[in-house]
Image (cartoon, grey):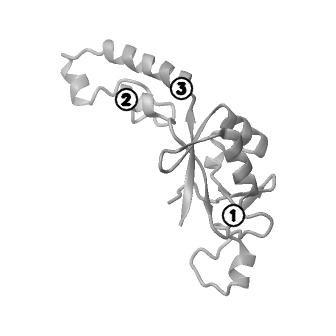
Amino acid sequence: MGTNFYRIPKSKQVMERHQKLHDRITHLDWFDVGQLSSDFRTIENPEDEWSPLNPWDEFMDNMQIHLGKRSMGWKFCWNFHDGKFYSNKQELLEFIRKGRVIDEYGGLIDVEEFIKMAMDWGQPDGLVLDENYFSENERHSVFNSSQYYDKIIDGLRVSSSTDFS
């Protein structure tokens, strides 16, 4: 069992999104049957051209970005989202500092305290999911394959998956 951490926008950014949401809703044609039947999905989504967003989807898009997870006995495991928001340690730290950090329970954490905790967690000998982990622990698993091994990027343990639980 561990704890997941997320980056959320600063209050000013949330208020800006709120204003945009308000403007979008104000300008919807509430009598247009086509819009109603499509759940008011009128906003193009650059990530998925087949699924336009509705105003609420747009407001919530990337509101909460998973940063990673800490677990006892393991080094902190970062989620790099396949390079969508950051691709190295410097970009990661800049991204974190431009927002706020919360844990999976909704607790707000000071950004610098989070960074220090995450960098120190499991150091120096915390576990990393790699070939050594499986051979040293004589574990047999479908995940004992290089495609599932953690990556090391700028000294950080980074999950090979973007799906955390």
**Residue at label 3?**
11
Q: Which residue is mark 2?
A: 56
User: What is the CA distance from the residue labelled 1 to the residue labelled 2?
Assistant: 35 Å
User: In the image, residue 35 lies at what x, y percent?
Assistant: 25, 23
Q: Are marks 3 and 2 in contact (CB under 8 Å)?
A: no
Secondary structure state at the residue bearing disc 3: helix
What residue is at 52 percent from the left and 45 percent from the top?
107
Mark 3 or mark 1: which is in front? 3
- Asked if residue 14 is positioned above or below residue 26 in the image, the reply reads below
Tell me: residue 139, above or below residue 71.
below
The residue carrying pointer 3 sits among few (fewer than 14), some (14 to 19) or many (20 or more) residues within 10 Å by Cα, namely: few
Residue mark closest to the camera, 3 vs 2: 3
Farthest residue in the bottom direction?
Answer: 138
Asked where in the image residue 37 lies, by quadrant, the reply is top left
Q: Quadrant for residue 126, please give it.
A: bottom right
User: Which tag, 1 or 2, sits closer to the chain's start?
Assistant: 2
| 3D distance between C-alphas at marks 3 and 1 | 34 Å
Residue where numbered disc 1 is placed: 150
Residue 59 drawn at (x, y percent): 43, 28
Q: Say what amino acid the circle numbered 3 marks.
A: Ser
**Image mark for residue 101:** none
Instruction: Identify the amino acid type marked 2.
Output: Trp
N-term mark: 3 or 1: 3
Residue ID at (74%, 48%): 116
Is 91 on the left or on the right of 82, as rendered? right
Amino acid at pointer 1? Asp
In the figure, residue 157 lies in which quadrant?
A: bottom right
**Percent x, y of residue 14:** 50, 25
